[in-house]
Amino acid sequence: MTFPVHRPRRLRRNAAIRAMVRETTLRPEQLVSPLFVTPGENRKKPIGSMPGHAQLSVDLALAEAKSLWALGIRSFLFFGLPDRKDDEGSGAWDPTGPVPTAMRAIKDALPDAVLMADVCVDEYTAHGHCGVLRTRRDGSVDVDNDATVERLARISLVYAEAGADVIAPSDMMDDRIGAIRRALDGNGHDEVIVMSYAVKYASAFYGPFREAADCAPKFGDRASYQMDPANTREAMREVALDLEEGADIVMVKPALAYLDVISRVKEAVSVPVAAYNVSGEYAMLHAAAANGWLDLTRVVKETLLSIRRAGADIIITYHARDIAEHL
Ligand code: PBG
């Protein structure tokens, strides 16, 4: 007679045993909540494709951060919507712009909060691209890498001066991590963390964000700077370069369609890995839940766990409020 010695169900028998053997945790302090900040006061403009999120003036962004803080969320990622845009995106380095103003106000009210500033010009440029443009010899127009990097370093300094704990460049220019690191170190900001959007794909999942931040490119697309969704080895190259240039944290974005990439990056590096659970991933679950097709709390938890399981230490997610009180 043979005995079934290996019976995995023994370890699933009750909640306490399941909790004891659980391999992956999901905690509010691992989540980062994005905030979209506008100038003005008492202004709230809901984002249609991202139910529960809105463009908020500084006072309302502060109230939102306080309410998320009460739920255990400790980190915020700032995006700014300026009143006016130009070809260079000069609003991005205005120290009186919505992002520096919001960071100063939130740092004052919540001194222990982790403030992360997304660094990119696309919300500030009239053409919607992530850099300044140049005309190539053949007459085609492209984003000028080095001219853009110079501006990114300038923006990073303005955000560091305003109290950013983390500078997070999302533009995908070459050499920007080193340039930003040098600018920070050269100006007394050696403690400021650089979290690189190291692996950012040219993804259709950013659709709702472009409504949220009003930054869809007015012509062409971002394929000459964001990565081809077909590539993984290139992702490893981007990560290696950013680490060499001094990145403290590397990010993969989007998350769900790229869990394999998160996992591979995690195995290859010893720095913390972040994943960005992007706007389209948020919109999908909310749309299905609004139709009664999915149980929102359960699918959000399962989704965020999958990103943690793949290897993300930190998850940037619009679901922070959906899930914090259920953790
Ligand atoms: C660009 C930026 C984008 C996102 C974050 N930073 C949009 C883009 O690259 O087009 C997308 C985030 C999301 O979809 O949630 N500065």
Image (tube, grey):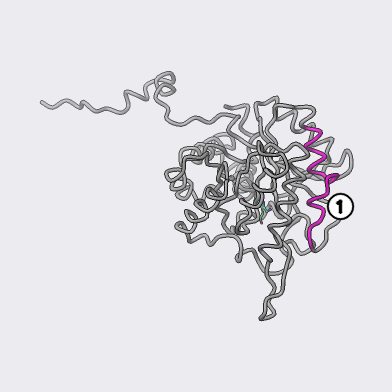
Residue 63 percent coordinates (x, y): 79, 31
Farthest residue toward the right?
A: 41
Query: Which quadrant is home to the N terminus?
Result: top left
* Region of the chain picked out in magenta, as a range: 88-106
Residue 50 can be seen in this image: no
Can you give x and y, in whole percent of width and height, for residue 70 in the image?
70, 24
Question: Which residue bears the numbered disc 1?
Answer: 83
Report the residue at 45% width, 57% height from top: 233
Predominant secondary structure, magenta span: helix
Element at label 1: loop
The residue closer to the viewer here, 45 or 131, is 131
Residue at the image position 86 percent from the left and 42 percent from the top: 43
Looking at the image, the residue that sits furthest to the bottom is 138
Where does the image place residue 119, in percent across and percent down from the top left?
A: 70, 49
Q: Residue furthest top?
A: 16
Q: Residue at x 62, y 41 (%)?
A: 317
> Which residue is more in the foreground, 142 or 183?
183
* Dot 1 amino acid type: Asp
- Whether disc 1's CB lies below 8 Å from ligand 1 is answered no
Q: Residues within 10 Å of mark 1 (few under 14, many from 20)?
A: few
Kindly tell me whether residue 175 is visible in this rendering: yes
